[in-house]
Amino acid sequence: MVPIKEFMSSYLELIAATDSVAHAAGRLRAFNLGCLLVRDNDDLVGIITDRDIAVRVAAKGKDARTTPVSEVMSPGLISCPETQSAEDVARMMEINQLHRVALLDAEGRATGIVSLGDLARNGYEDLVARVVIGHARSMYAHAGSPWLR
């Protein structure tokens, strides 16, 4: 069992919950990231993704300069120890319908993020396929898709 920390993305950025969405979007662009972990003082309280900004800000016509990150982030951070196996992390992603999971060290500090892309690049294509298929089935089931009838 190879611990997930062996192929996690160790570069991560945090942003304050009170910062503006415009600031978050600028940091996503500047660092070429898909997400930022959100903190309130020293506590991790959520994650904001490029999709959150598109769906919860741009599509709703909100002003990104005045909207705080806390208003549009995905609250409650799903995380796991950096010693977890790829199989366990993929199962967590599948159950929680996630594309990314934050990894924590023994002291509970965020040390990285693992994404479906990280798993795929490291030989876990079968796990990624299972997660993506699970997401698709759940999405269509919730939407009442005729494809699942």
Image: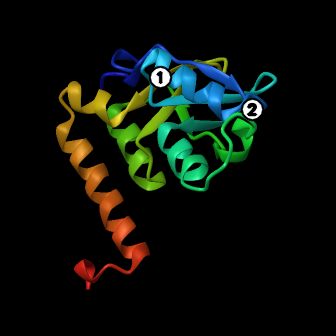
Mark 1 residue type: Arg
Secondary structure of residue under mark 2:
loop
Q: How many marks?
A: 2
Where 141 falls versus 19 (above or below)?
below
For residue 122, side relative to residue 31 (left or right): left
Name the residue nearer the viewer: 112 or 12. 12
From the viewer's perspective, is the residue at label 2 or at label 1 nearer? 1
- Asked if the residues shown at circle 2 and circle 1 are in contact, with their CB atoms under 8 angstroms apart, the answer is no
How far apart marks 2 and 1 lie (CA) works out to: 18 Å
- Rendered residue at 18%/29% (across/down): 123
| Disc sitting over residue 29 in the figure | 1
Find residue 59 and report its horizontal and vertical position in percent. 54, 54
Secondary structure of residue under mark 1:
helix
| Disc sitting over residue 17 in the figure | 2
- Rendered residue at 66%/44% (across/down): 76
Classify mark 1: residues with Cα within 10 Å, few (<14), some (14-19) or many (20+).
few
Find residue 87 and report its horizontal and vertical position in percent. 32, 39
